[in-house]
Image: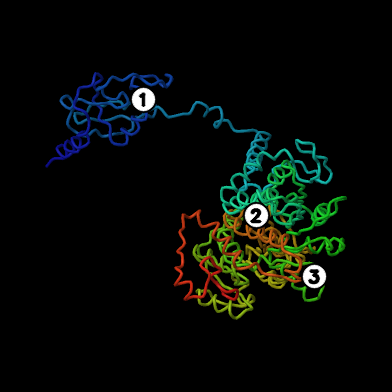
Amino acid sequence: MSVQVVAAKMAEVELQDVPSKESPAESPVTPNSEDKKLVKTEPHEVGSSATTPTAEPSVKAGDPSPGLLTPNPAKMPQASAMRRPDQQQNGGDAFVNRDGTVAEAPRMKKIQFADQKQEFNKRPSKIGRRSLSRSISQSSTDSYSSAASYTDSSDDETSPRDKQQKNSKGNGDFCIKNIKQADFGRREIEIAEQEMPALMALRKRAQGEKPLAGAKVVGCTHITAQTAVLMETLSALGAQCRWAACNIYSTQNEVAAALAEGGFSVFAWKGESEDDFWWCIDRCVNLEGWQPNMILDDGGDLTHWIYKKYPNMFKKIKGIVEESVTGVHRLYQLSKAGKLCVPAMNVNDSVTKQKFDNLYCCRESILDGLKRTTDVMFGGKQVVVCGYGEVGKGCCAALKAMGSIVYVTEIDPICALQACMDGFRLVKLNEVIRQVDIVITCTGNKNVVVREYLDRMKNGCIVCNMGHSNTEIDVASLRTPELTWERVRSQVDHVIWPDGKRIVLLAEGRLLNLSCSTVPTFVLSITATTQALALIELYNAPEGRYKQDVYLLPKKMDEYVASLHLPTFDAHLTELSDEQAKYLGLNKNGPFKPNYYRY
């Protein structure tokens, strides 16, 4: 079979889906598949000028598309057209037909957006580049969403303590970054409300009764959209609230502005100094004519400040609600020393806090915090997690699922055995410190990662903390003349050794997820509802029910908090029959487990 015949058959295959109707514009050119695609994108006929406006041509029903050259098979040479460059046609292409004649290929216009030449073909000047860079940077920080709130959105470097701000009602009893961000913060709070069904249900059910009427709650927690929903729920239940932040990096400035606009006395902003931190707490507590009678604490700093500066206030305080490991540890120390003046509720060790906030929250937020700050890929990375409590379990599960090689350090043989049974290698920190890529602390202890370990880390090792306190990593030992600190971005620092080695320190050793990202709202709904119920219980408890000691939340209350969240999943609980309840020795309505039961 000759080459020409083979070529003719190939041409027939290429043209088999082309309409057989004759086109008014006949052409000896047979476009190949690549040309067809190019021509289809051009709505003009071949003869149109390159400068013709790109208006859509009118096409009658049944006519061939004006963007495609439709050849007449009866008059076409049945052979493939060989394409060759024609140097005489300004670099254009030409086709050589079987009979030797040369036909010029149709000129294809480049698709160009109207503003392309003006905006992209012009290289900015040096000043223009700076302006463009600043514009992009500013636009990225002006989005006051929770995802971007860890980047300061204001160029104003004036300390909020030096500003005189008032909300729309003329009230100035607050100290925040910028009251003008209130509208953005309100949107954040509205989004959070959708993911906090239990608090919203509690607000709806109990606001008629006002179980916290007369309560004056002073709080020190992370000031986020989720905390705002809690504060507004407490207010709806009758409480007056004054609030400060428990972490200098976790405050969402726009949310603080929305709370101030709503009439709450809030004293917090992102990036406080240590002095600012204690000043804000003092402003919350020390107000003439206002005496708190309930404390909601996260970390124990507020309780410590009142105990140190205003011990007489405890005469009117009915109770303390504490939600962190660090704060609970301080309360037990005070109780053991006989210095605890009021009853305290240990929310941290309630089932709803331990099994949901500590575990599921950290399982998701550890990845979020690391990704936002370092853009690290987890697959194949060697990670050591210090501590295998509920926080450690969540972190390890997430990292393992992403393909990381995870080591665990632990002092408790029970937790250590759990880590081994879950497939993690139990090590001492000094055994792996030279080889790991990421070090995560979540023990609630102090000096877990000391200068000796920091000196031995590999170049580029990421160091962060998932515990509440900033004492787990010995950051103070890194502030020495021989080491150089280099700010990379918000909450990310390079600490550089004299030989050039550097580590990546996140949030200066403070809580990673709330300092550098956000946490799942739904999980915080569980904790916040538990806190609200603990406040109601302590505030309304008859005198003598609770002594000057630390108490766990009643099991029945834990179960109630969990039940409020089940409708979100369209979940249906099975009910015990009378016979089954009698057999188990239980009340049909709970509690279903004894206090010593470990979930």
Circle nearer the N terminus (2, 3) = 3
Q: Quadrant of residue 176?
A: top right
Asked whether residue 391 appears in the rendered view, the answer is no
Q: Which residue is mark 2?
A: 516
Tell me if label 2 and label 3 are in contact, CB under 8 Å. no
SS type, badge 1: loop
Q: Which residue is mark 1?
A: 43
**Mark 2 or mark 3: which is in front?**
3
Position of 124 with respect to 9 (left or right) is right
Q: What type is the residue that disc 1 sits on? A: Pro
Q: Which residue is mark 3?
A: 340
Q: Quadrant of the C terminus?
A: bottom right
Mark 2 to mark 1 CA distance (whole Å): 50 Å
- State the residue at coordinates (65%, 40%): 184
Q: Quadrant of residue 545?
A: bottom right
Position of 584 with respect to 469 (left or right) is left
Mark 2 to mark 3 CA distance (whole Å): 34 Å
Q: Position of residue 393 (x, y in %)?
A: 56, 69
